[in-house]
Amino acid sequence: MKLELDTLGKQYGDTWALQDVDLELDPGVVGLLGPNGAGKSTLMQIVTTFTKPTEGTVRWNGTDVVDSPGAIREDVGYLPQEFGVYPSLTAREFLQYLAAVRGLSEPTERIEQLLNLVNLEDDADRRLGGFSGGMRRRAGIAQALLSDPDLLIVDEPTVGLDPTERARFRSLLTSLAADRIVVLSTHIVPDVEATADEIALLDDGQLLTHTTPADLLAAVEGSVWEAIVSESELADLKSRHTVASMTRRSDGVHVRIVADESPVQGANLAEPTLEEAYLSRVEQSPTTATMEVSQ
């Protein structure tokens, strides 16, 4: 199976939400990473055929889905960021209803498999209105998997989840990627670090890079520094360099800085994190990144 995007673009009025995006995806998890407003949601809406591109093509297993949207609709599962449920239905009833809407025949066994997969078997007969945010997201991934899709697209799936639910969701996505393409769209770098085989980095509607986490890290090797600075030095430092993190302690502000050369006296080279590699790459584009660092 293969998903190909060729010079994909989407224009709204005078603004290009996407422009000249080229991607080729095979089975595994690809992290669609970028700041808010980078164009991630627009790209997903085009791939799932909710929106038509202004230019370019999307091919699913060689078929142009702009001309033949049914080719991908039968094979895609989608979990949008804003996922609505029917609060009066139980999880099992919800999946049964959606299976009927989608015309799935004899879905009972599949529904039970999915309830077990997303760890909702003990809560299958509880009403969705009483579910936590994490449980609703798990019900959402179950509905996206009803037809056992070859292409699974999830949009900001861990936003608002507590650390335990976030870790569980990451593990679930990883387990699903053995025999399908999973597109994880997020601005939360640790989600990508924990799950993705590849990273497609978007900013300002353009694809900055399509690479592996290891290669993205290698590109910033030797450019991350640790130092302890005073409050008065901090403002000047932030005006000249990317300060990836800072922690105020009794002996000063402990900072990690992305810079080609030692940014302050006494700075020491440090092993880069994926967050710092992300910041370094996005800093090279015209748009300033807005990212969430969350464990």
Image: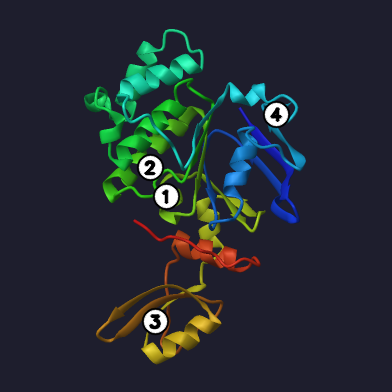
Compared with residue 83, is residue 278 higher up or lower down, i.e. above or below? below
**Image disc number at residue 65:** 4
**Image disc number at residue 1:** none
Q: Amino acid at mark 4?
A: Val
Compared with residue 18, is residue 266 higher up or lower down, i.e. above or below? below
- Coordinates of residue 92 in the picture (x, y in percent): 32, 20
Task: Please name which of the two marks, 1 or 4, marks the residue nearer to the observer.
Answer: 4
Mark before the other along the chain sequence, 3 or 4: 4
Q: Is residue 201 visible?
A: yes
Residue drawn at (66%, 54%) of the image: 205
Instruction: Kindly indicate whether the residue at mark 2 contacts the one at mark 3 (C-beta within 8 angstroms).
Output: no
Q: CA distance from mark 1 to mark 4?
A: 29 Å
Q: Amino acid at mark 1?
A: Asp
Q: Which residue is mark 2?
A: 170
- Coordinates of residue 53 in the picture (x, y in percent): 72, 40
Kindly state the secondary structure of the residue where label 4 is placed: loop
